[in-house]
Image (tube, rainbow, N blue to C red):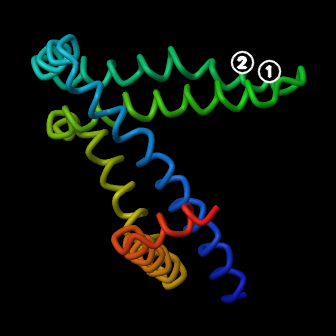
Amino acid sequence: MKRLWNIIIGGLAAIYFLLDAVFAMIAIPLARWIASQWMFVRVHRWIVSLGPYPTLLLFLVPLIVLEPVKPVAAYLAATHHVWIGLAVLSIGEILKLVLVERLFHISRDKLLTIRAFAWAYGKYVIARDWLTSLEAWQRVRRSRLAIRRYARGLRSSGASRAIFQSY
């Protein structure tokens, strides 16, 4: 039973780190670009000026606007437009995550003044810490870091250029 549990946690950790890598590759540069645009600087100031409850309501905007992307993507996939459906789903989810992440980054301290939000966030942190402390999670994390170091070593040594130039 313990072995099965380790396999399940290891699989979840691998999926998490894979999605995290994709998210980091796409969403972080997108979030930085959005934050640097002049009109978003004004939006940032406006969000900072809001109280905790209006800020919490603001979190609903990306959900309300971008949640319908899922059924649209499912419809596209069901009508034999699988790649377009996947693209719509990917873009919609990345935008939603970026917007929610930016909102949370801007207003975390303010949101934590709301008792129910602070309670729910505290439970989330406890669950996250428990999951990431599991042996299987740590094993996958170490593997990911080792792969990253190896890839950086290849990149800095110029080995990747030599491989691609030989073709």
Residue 104: % across, % down: 28, 36
Look at the image and tell me in which quarter the N terminus lies: bottom right
Residue 128: % across, % down: 41, 63
**Mark 2, residue position:** 72
Q: In this view, does 161 lie above or below 100?
A: below
Q: How far apart are marks 2 and 1 (CA)?
A: 6 Å
Badge 1 marks a residue whose secondary structure is: helix
**Mark 1, residue position:** 76
Q: Is residue 69 left or right of residue 150?
A: right
Q: In this view, does 7 lie above or below 67?
A: below
Dots 2 and 1: beta carbons under 8 Å?
Answer: yes
Q: Which residue is drawn at 41% across and 21% down?
A: 60
- Snapshot quadrant of residue 127: bottom left
Q: Which residue is drawn at 60% across and 75% down?
A: 10
Residue 139: % across, % down: 50, 83
Look at the image and tell me in which quarter the C terminus lies: bottom right
